[in-house]
Amino acid sequence: MKTFLTLFISGLLFASITTAQNCGCSPDLCCSRFGFCGSDEAYCGTGCQQGPCFSPPPTNDVSVESIVTDAFFNGIKDQSDASCEGRDFYTRAAFLEALGNYQQFGRVGSEDDSKREIAAFFAHVTHETGHFCYIEEINGPSRDYCDENNTQYPCNPNKGYYGRGPIQLSWNFNYGPAGSSIGFDGLNNPETVATDPIISFRTALWFWMNNVHSVILSGQGFGATIRAINGILECDGGNPDTVTSRVRYYTQYCSQLGVAPGDNLRC
């Protein structure tokens, strides 16, 4: 997730003009997670801050823990080299503890919907971390992921907001709100994502639930989740090889979980 929703960066820049607590919307409008007023899913759905926010869909009876078994989780990790630092950092126990904060992950829609969401999440995690090998982005400190125009989540000049964790959280406009939601100082201590495995998984689930969860449940297909994570950097011919990699993991995990992957696999 090196650049997070490239297609929406312009919207994020304007979002810094107002805070989520003071959108100034009329009573019949919702304040979106980016601080804008509106009445449809983009404003009243996931991340809605105030107003007539849509109620979350009901959860089903699926047990994510029973799907993400030791065999499934370790089957991913065991494909990485024994010297990888992530092998001791990423654990199923840490994932399950982090999951407690996100009760709707893998538990909305039918059982097949749940399995497809779980397969999609771990497909992206596998690709981003190299089978749970990498905790931080390769050459991350050399990259500048500071959006100086975002005054709502200003960068600490002594910190780097490069990719960390299972989904490789990047940019100040992700570290800031993720930290506020989860309970750590994302702007001044972004390295926490690479030192605390539970917080690390929580950032991945936070990003997923705010940006990807509704996409895959809407029936747009796995390809739409790739677009939600890396936008035009990979989609529309941007990097077909990485798209192929993500799709390969997704279809592999769907097969393991006994569910059809569905249509629209590429973006």
Image (cartoon, rainbow, N blue to C red):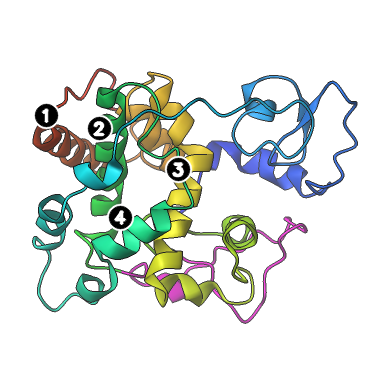
- Point 61% across, 64% down: residue: 146
Q: CA distance from mark 3 to mark 2?
A: 15 Å
Magenta segment, prevailing SS (helix, strand or loop): loop
Tell me if residue 198 is in the magenta stretch.
no
Q: Amino acid at mark 2?
A: Lys
Q: Earlier in the sequence, mark 3 or mark 2?
A: 3
- Residues shaded magenta: 135-162
Q: Is residue 192 above or below residue 98?
A: below
**Residue toward you, 155 or 176:** 176
Q: Position of residue 70 (x, y in %)?
A: 14, 56
User: For mark 3, what is the residue?
Assistant: 103
Residue contact between numbered discs 2 and 1, judged by CB atoms under 8 Å: yes
User: For mark 2, what is the residue?
Assistant: 115
Q: CA distance from mark 4 to mark 3?
A: 24 Å
Q: Earlier in the sequence, mark 4 or mark 1?
A: 4
Residue 265 occupies which quadrant of the picture? Answer: top left
Q: Amino acid at mark 4?
A: Glu
- Point 69% across, 28% down: residue: 43
**How many residues crowd around disc 2 within 10 Å: few (fewer than 14), some, or many (20 or more)?**
many
- Quadrant (top left/top right/bottom left/bottom right) for the C terminus: top left
